[in-house]
Amino acid sequence: MFIETTPEQIEKIMQDAWNAFHVYRKFSLKKRAEFMRVIAVELESCGDTLIHTAMSETNLPEARLRGERARTIFQLNSYGTACEKGEWLGVCIDTAIPDKTPPKPDIRKTLVPVGPVVVFGASNFPFAYSTAGGDTACAFAAGCPVIVKAHPAHAATSEIVANAILLAANKCNMPKGIFAHVHGAGFETGKELVTHRYTKAVGFTGSYAGGKQLFDWGNQRKEPIPVFAEMGSINPVFLLPEKLKASAADIAQLCVGSITLGAGQFCTNPGLIIGIESDALQTFIHDLGKAIQKILPAPMLHPGILSAYKKNKSNALLQEGVHLVAESETTVKDNEGLPTVATASGKTFLSNPLLHQEVFGPYSIVIRCKDMKEMVEVAKNLEGQLTSTLMATDADVIENDELVEAVKNICGRFILNNVPTGVEVCLSMHHGGPFPSSTDSRFTSVGADGIKRFARPISFQNWSNNLLPDELKNENPLGIWRTVNNELTKEVV
Amino acid sequence: MFIETTPEQIEKIMQDAWNAFHVYRKFSLKKRAEFMRVIAVELESCGDTLIHTAMSETNLPEARLRGERARTIFQLNSYGTACEKGEWLGVCIDTAIPDKTPPKPDIRKTLVPVGPVVVFGASNFPFAYSTAGGDTACAFAAGCPVIVKAHPAHAATSEIVANAILLAANKCNMPKGIFAHVHGAGFETGKELVTHRYTKAVGFTGSYAGGKQLFDWGNQRKEPIPVFAEMGSINPVFLLPEKLKASAADIAQLCVGSITLGAGQFCTNPGLIIGIESDALQTFIHDLGKAIQKILPAPMLHPGILSAYKKNKSNALLQEGVHLVAESETTVKDNEGLPTVATASGKTFLSNPLLHQEVFGPYSIVIRCKDMKEMVEVAKNLEGQLTSTLMATDADVIENDELVEAVKNICGRFILNNVPTGVEVCLSMHHGGPFPSSTDSRFTSVGADGIKRFARPISFQNWSNNLLPDELKNENPLGIWRTVNNELTKEVV
């Protein structure tokens, strides 16, 4: 157990972060990137101690945790590279036209950091979306100090990572206050951090209840701040007729792998599969059931998540019109979640909002629509989603435009004949869908574009060239792409 | 007087807008741009009737209104050009790496429109930030239908412009519901619009009280939506010692022109000027007073704005430590605002929050700081601003880094030796500062980047080339710059 951070300590931490902000934001992109790379090295240096601590706190298997640490290191390095490259600043320059009436001044736009960022770790990603995870990496790249509230379920893991960051900060001569680590099991610590006057943005990955609370606190401040909460979703998979007829068995295999990956504890887990009543759908449900029976149950992250899984799944199965398809045939141990698949009609789904809610774990429900019209109705009645998937031939897509448009309208990532789990870390990734899957669908929490969450544009008007930030100087010392008088170029001005 | 739109009519209007959204969002960028250009033509065709109606409703002089219409037409055309060009989509493509473990899928990111946008017209810009103004142009460019709530102070002007838009929509075969015009003097109509389930974003230019109310309504919805409210600011001008010593008289002339431009009714009006006690500052204040005495008073927009100006100015002048410097020597007519300049010490300003508030009209207060340290204190204690200005030599800037950084941290546009009034419509313009000057400092309401307010990113994963939107297709049919595997290029994939 770690000692809870007191309100007095938080005040001190935030004051230090605010002071650090005024120093750190002036550091070059190169220096920020170096800091991030040193954190990556320190994270690697934590060695097996870190992996074993995380295993004991999260029940996650060793291979997964080694993979996740590698991903976290990749994030730090690749976001660092993106930071240094400077394209994310989206520099625009319009040069003066003195003989225009009135004269047009020289104007140059770049991004500046917003200020100290509070990050809440995720229970299901102890490395990649926690202490030194994506939010922290993005904030450092943007030029912001970071205050991490440790997830109570893996506080010791978080402490090791926090020490690695502090070691890196020391090695890189970062200002005192560039990073702080806070413990607190109740909601008070989180509230103090989000509502503190020096906090300028918040990153969060977790439940709807948690994320929505932070979002409300952020907006109710005298000075509202952006809260980027990724709150998960049920990630619907639509089975289109021609594709389903051709490949029911293959799709069932794909789906079952995705549903049970990591004991179903991913925010992109496909918790909802929608088809149209047909022999092919019967085959699909049959094969899905057969496949789920063969899945070996796995331990869930912690007792709270396991009991929520059991409760939410039971609730769903108790709803009128919901039928169990199959469960794993293997007896579960005390800490394991039982892989389960259920089914219900389109009518049942449309009339019962409880079935729209996420059951976090290795569970999915297959909705049997009576026709395409009802499938479109289901799509139109779905809340915002991180991802949506179509299993469809080209003809399916072309012939069902209304469905395709309705599905596109509710998601942040739109997948064709692939599974939603597995979130690639790259610039083209958008991880953040319409509410309630995230609080701000305009920003991603995966990929280097996530840096933009913690910066805001500023225009410099009529400045002398030598006084401008490097990215805005005539001679383009960073050698970056810039939009100069409406044309992208790397040329000097 | 116009008949207030009833709740039943609003329900119908929003349903039509929602239906129109599903059609319009699929229109090509070219078709959207054509629609915007036809609106521009129709606006021109309204001829003198529109100008005369606006003159009678707003008290603004003919030349200003003709200029503002030209600016509005320029916005429609230039945002249309930007829309068609497609760079604003910020396309990123990462091609598949099938032999990676696990295989990396093909992912391609673009922007999609958010849905129907509600726009509230500004009292001080009956054309450029009202019915067919910047918000409307940006929303159409993004692919969103628009519902405009007419500003009650220029409802007839708004009606003429609305008819021009509807005529253009008809000529361009736009879907029914692409645009609607709503009247309502009280707050109920606005609340119904902002809280309607089909409204997906809001644009507003006006007072803090109005903008903050819309922002709160937007966030309190079951599905929160972004509210882009530009709420004005006091746009501080900092007079640095070396520059002031060299050019006190010139700066006073510049400032007085900016303070009284358009009867001071601009959101970028410099309502606060900060200097350090010195002979140069005395000269500046003296010259500023002399100059304001010579300014001819001008009519204000409407009686409500005039009476608020009188009240807020009187309040400011009544504060302890605030002294009148000078007023216009010309007797004001009933509908005119009296140009006025006041002064107070840095200590007075720091201890009285009322002096931080905007006095909308031809008024400014000069703060006399005892030294640079107090000037820095003033900068650190200022709320978010649309603009901040330094009157400074290069040496002033270099030697006063703490001040420069503090000022940069509170503004959206940072001006050197120039005035804040005059907001250039160009890509490098950022019009939107930290709260409370706007509700979302990350987005601009002037310039084509304002289009991004009404769109959100979406990633397409594993799609067949022929099924992708044009901007994402391998062959790059739009011929736009795209980031392909981390490199900007116009090449085919």
Image (cartoon, coloured by chain):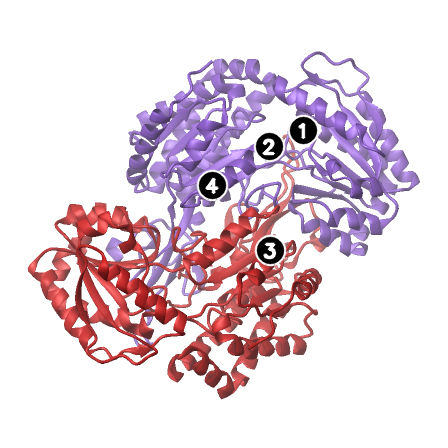
Chain colours: A purple, B red
Quadrant of res A350: top right
Instruction: Please indicate, yes or no, whether residue B369 appears anywhere in the rendered image.
Output: yes
- The amino acid type, in three-letter code, at marker 3 is Val
As measured in the structure, the alpha-carbon distance from the residue carrying label 3 to the one carrying label 1 is: 41 Å
Q: Is residue A295 above or below residue B32?
A: above
Judging by the rendered image, the residue that carries numbered circle 3 is B492
| Whether marks 2 and 4 lie on the same chain | yes
- The amino acid type, in three-letter code, at marker 4 is Gly
Image location (x, y in percent) of residue B119: 54, 64
- The amino acid type, in three-letter code, at marker 2 is Ser
Judging by the rendered image, the residue that carries numbered circle 2 is A207
Quadrant of res A417: top right
Front disc: 4 or 3: 4
Earlier along the polypeptide chain: callout 1 or callout 2?
2
Label 1: state its secondary structure: loop
Judging by the rendered image, the residue that carries numbered circle 4 is A218
Judging by the rendered image, the residue that carries numbered circle 1 is A360
| Whether marks 1 and 2 lie on the same chain | yes
Number of residue marks: 4
Dot 1: chain letter: A
